[in-house]
Image (tube, rainbow, N blue to C red):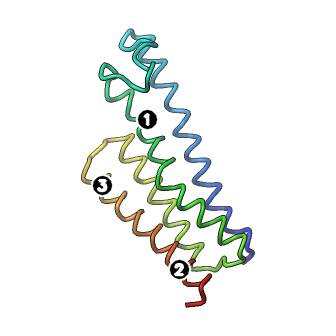
Amino acid sequence: MEVQDIFLPVAALALWTLLVLGLVPIARFRAAAAGRVSAHDFKTGESAQVPPDVSVPNRAFMNLLEVPVLFYMACIVAFLTHHVEGRLITLAWIYVALRVAHSLVYLVYNNVMHRLAVFAISNFVVVAIWLMLTSQLLHL
């Protein structure tokens, strides 16, 4: 295993984030073409007039920019300090899979309890990544 292997799950999550981002204008333009929204509905974000099927892709995208910052940062720290090991890479891939699953639940059928469960588990994984990395860095 090489230290740069940590960038494979990073790249996978970044690619997934960009794919979800692509859904945002598609949903908005389709809704605008159907007369369901106007440009004014997005003047300060999304107004209350924006239908859920139009706002969900944007929310899914925003979720991929919030807590995952901690994941990206941990991976960069691990790379820069040469603390990349098999357990960390495994946890990184688990985190990516959970974030993809969270997005798919959101985008496909949006069951709040399923979404919450996957979100919570992914947060525990990112905490585990940071605990492992901190332990290694501080030689605990």
Identity of the residue drawn at 58% across and 75% down: 88
The quadrant of the image that shows the N terminus is bottom right
Q: Specify which label sits upstream in the sequence, 3 or 1.
A: 1
Asked whether the residues under the numbered discs 1 and 2 touch, taking CB atoms below 8 Å apart as contact, a structural biologist would say no
Name the disc covering residue 57, or none.
Answer: 1
* Quadrant for the C terminus in the image: bottom right
Residue type of the residue flagged with mark 2: Met
The single residue placed furthest to the left in the displayed view is 113
Q: On the image, which quarter does residue 50 sit in?
A: top left
Residue at image point 26% right, 48% down: 112
Callout in the foreground (3, 2): 2
Circle 2 residue: 132
- Spatial CA distance of label 1 from label 2 is 33 Å
Residue holding disc 3: 116
Measure the alpha-carbon separation of dots 3 and 2: 24 Å
- Disc 1 residue type? Pro
Residue 89 at x, y = what percent? Answer: 60, 72
Measured as percent of width and height from the top left, residue 96 is found at 52, 59
With respect to residue 59, does 70 lie above or below? below
Q: Residues within 10 Å of mark 3 (few under 14, many from 20)?
A: some
Q: Nearer the viewer, residue 66 or 30?
A: 66
* Mark 1 surroundings: few (<14), some (14-19) or many (≥20) residues within 10 A: many
Q: Name above or below for residue 58 compared with residue 37.
A: below
In this view, the residue in front, 127 or 87, is 127
